[in-house]
Image (cartoon, rainbow, N blue to C red):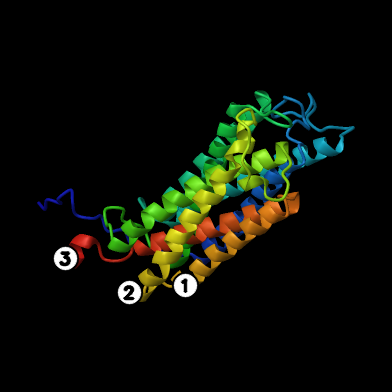
Amino acid sequence: MSIIRESEPQIIASVRSPRFARFATAVLIYLVLVILWGAWVRITGSGAGCGNHWPDCNGQVIPWEPTQQTLIEFTHRLSSGLTLPLVLIMLVWAWRSFPKGHGVRWACVGTLGFLLSESALGAGLVKFELVADNTSVARAITASLHLINTFTLAGFCALAAWWAQRGYSPNWQLRSRASLVLLPGLAALLLASMSGAITALGDTLFPTTLGAHFAAHPAETHFLVQLRIVHPVLATVAALYLIFVLPGLSESHPQLRGGLRLSLLLGAQLLLGVINVLLAAPGWMQLVHLGMALLVWLACLLFWVQSQELPSTSEMA
C-alpha cells in the first residue's frame, strides 16, 4: 500500500478541448458586452427604469409602454438573463469532457457562482433603490463590490477557456517566484479597479470638469467628489509596479510570453485614464476605459496563471 504525503501535488491528466475553449471564449466576449451595457445603464441613469421591481419590470413581465430608461434597463436584464443558459452549457460540457478535479471544471463552477452573485447584487441595487440619483455610501460600497464580482466572474470564464485550450490543470500547491512577484500587482490592480467604480459613479452623479479630479475641495463637498483623486493614484501605482516587473519576468522565464506587450497595454490604459480626465469623463470614454480595464485584468490574470506552471521556489533551490 502506497502512502501519498499531503505535500505531494496531485497529478491530473492533461486534457485539451479546442471546441470547448472556443465556446467559452464566445461566452466571455458576450459577457463583456453585457458588462459594458450594464455600465451604460449607470451612465444614463437608467437603473430605475423598471422601478424597484425585480425580476419583473414595473410590475410587468414585458413593459408595453416603456420609456427610454426602461428600454435600457430591460435590455440589460434580458441580456444578463441569457448568460445563465450559456454558462450552464459550459458547466455540463466541462463535466462531460474533463476529469474530476480538472481546472476547467472548477473555473466553470466559479463562473456560475459569480454569475449568480452578480444577479443578486443587481437585484439588490434595484430593490434597495441604490440606482439613478442615489448618492449614498451604501451605493458606493455596492458599486465597488459589484465591480470586484464582475472582474472575478470574467476571470473564471477566461480561465475555463484558457485551461481548456492548453490542456493544463493548475496545481495551487506550487508557488513559483514569478507568481509571488506578480501577486502584489494583481491585488493593487483590483483595488484600483474598485476605486475606479466609485470614481465613475461620482462622475455620473456629479458631472466633472477639466482638472476637477486633482482640485482641492471644501470639507462639505460630497464624499464621491472628494474621492476622485484616489483612483488615479492607485491605478498609477498598480500599473507602474506591473510595468516594472513584467518585462523582466518574461526575459528571465521564456515560458512567460508577452510581458512587454502587457506592459504596453498597461501604459495605454494609463493614457486612456488621463484622456478620460481631460475630457471630463464622457459616457463613451467611460465605456472605453472600462473595456480596457477588463482586458488588462484578464491579460494580467492569465499571465499570472502562466507563472503557476513554472517550477516552484522549493524546486529551484
| Vertical relation: 22 (above or below) 128 | below
Name the residue type under label 2.
Ser
**Image point 36% across, 69% down: which residue?**
249
Residue matched to label 2: 252
Tell me which label, 2 or 1, sits earlier in the chain: 2
Name the residue type under label 1.
Leu
Side (left or right) of 117 relative to 132: left
Tell me the quarter of the picture where residue 255 sits: bottom left
Does residue 50 appear anywhere in the picture? yes
Side (left or right) of 279 relative to 229: right
Circle 1 Cα neighbour tier, 10 Å, few/some/many (<14 / 14–19 / ≥20):
some
**Image point 40% across, 60% down: which residue?**
304
Residue matched to label 3: 317
Residue 24, which numbered label?
none
Name the residue type under label 3.
Ala
Name the front one of labels 1 and 3: 1
Which element is circle 2 on? helix
Q: Give me the C-alpha separation between circle 2 and circle 1.
A: 12 Å
Circle 3 Cα neighbour tier, 10 Å, few/some/many (<14 / 14–19 / ≥20):
few
Residue matched to label 1: 260
| Vertical relation: 219 (above or below) 191 | above
| Vertical relation: 317 (above or below) 191 | below
**Cβ–Cβ under 8 Å for marks 2 and 1:** no
Quarter of the image with the C terminus is bottom left
Q: Give me the C-alpha separation between circle 1 and circle 3.
A: 27 Å
Question: Percent from the top left, x then y, of residue 35?
Answer: 64, 47
**Cβ–Cβ under 8 Å for marks 1 and 3:** no
Question: Percent from the top left, x then y, of residue 77?
Answer: 71, 39
Tell me the quarter of the picture where residue 97 sits: bottom left
Question: Percent from the top left, x then y, of residue 200?
Answer: 65, 43
Q: Give me the C-alpha separation between circle 3 and circle 2.
A: 16 Å
Does residue 258 appear anywhere in the picture? no
